[in-house]
Amino acid sequence: MMFYAFRLYTPKLSFQLPDNFKEILRYSAYIILAGSAGAIILDIDKVMIPSKEVVNIAAYYAVAVFIGSFIEAPSRAMSQILQPLTSKTLNENNNSEVENLYKKSSINLLLIGGLFFLLVNCGVVELFKLMPEKGYSEGVLVVLMISVAKLYNMFLGNNGAIINNSKFYRIALPIGVGMALSVYFLNNYLFEFFRTDGFALATLITILIFNTLKIFFVKAKFNMTPFTNKSIQLILVILCVFLVFYFWNFPFHPILNILFKSILIVVSYLFMVLKMNISPEIDNLIKRFIK
C-alpha cells in the first residue's frame, strides 16, 4: 500500500513549520481528545463490570459486544473514502455535493448495515448454542442493543466527517466528553435494575441521544439531513424481516439453522431492496452480479 501510494503521489519532505501550524495543532488536539472520549464508550463497560459482578461476566459481555459491533465493519471501510471526499467538498463550499454524499452514505450504509444486523441477530441464539458455557447465552439482549446502536451510527452516514472537517469541529469534543460521562452515570444507574444488560442499554441510550443531537446540529448549521424518501421504507423492510426470522428457527443443528436462515434472509432482504429501488448504487451492483 505504501509503495502504491508513493507511486500515485510522492511526498515532498520539508522541515519548516507551516504558517498555520498552531491551527493544525489545535485541530489535531480537539479531534484526538474527542475521538479518545468517544472510544471509551464500549470499553468503559468492561472496566466497570468486574467491580459489580464476577470477572468472567466481563468476558461474556465483551464477546456479546464484539458480535454486536460486527455490523459496523462496512462503515469503517467506507469512512476511508468519505473522509477525503467530504473534506474536499466542504473546502470548495460545495454544499449541494456535501448533502448528496450525506444522503447517499446514509441510505447505503443503512442498507448494508441492515443486512448485517439481520444476519447477526437472527442467528445469535443458535450461535450461543454452540457455546454452551454458562453466561454466553445471556448476552442475546446485549448483542441486540449494541447492534441497534451501531446501526444508528451507520444511519448517520458521513455526519461525523461533516462536523470534523468543517469550521465547527470544536463541537466534537464536548459531544465526545458528554457521551463518555453519560455512559458512566447511566451504567451505575441502570445496573441496579437490569444488571449487565443495563450497560448495553446505557450505551444504546447515549448513542441514540447524542447522535440525534449531531443530526440536529448539522441540520442547523448546514441545512441538510441524512433522510431520503427511501429511509423509512428501508427501516420498515429491516423491521419486517427481523420480526419474521428472529422468533422462528429450523428444527436442525445450530450450524445448519444459521446457514439456512442466513440464505433466506439474504434472498428476501435483497429481493425487497431491489423491488423498492432503495439505492440505485446497490441496485446496479446486485444486478451486475445477478447477470
Image (cartoon, rainbow, N blue to C red):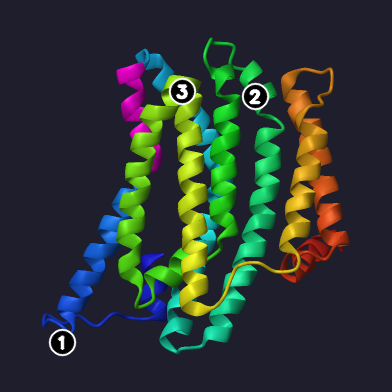
Asked if the stretch drawn in magenta spans residue 43, the answer is yes
Q: Earlier in the sequence, mark 1 or mark 3?
A: 1
Q: Secondary structure at mark 3?
A: loop
Residue 155 shows up from this direction: yes
The image quarter containing residue 192 is: top left
Q: Which residues are magenta?
A: 41-52
Q: Amino acid at mark 2?
A: Leu
The image quarter containing residue 122 is: top right
Relative to residue 173, is residue 150 depicted above or below?
A: above
Q: Amino acid at mark 3?
A: Thr
Tell me the residue that label 3 is attached to: 196
Residue 112, given in percent of the width and then of the height, sits at 67, 54
Relative to residue 145, is residue 140 depicted above or below?
A: above
Residue 248, given in percent of the width and then of the height, sits at 82, 26
Is residue 144 left or right of 261 when viewed as pictured? left
Residue 127's disc number: 2
Q: Secondary structure at mark 1?
A: loop
Q: Secondary structure at mark 2?
A: helix
Name the residue located 30 percent from the left edge and 63 percent from the top edge. 31
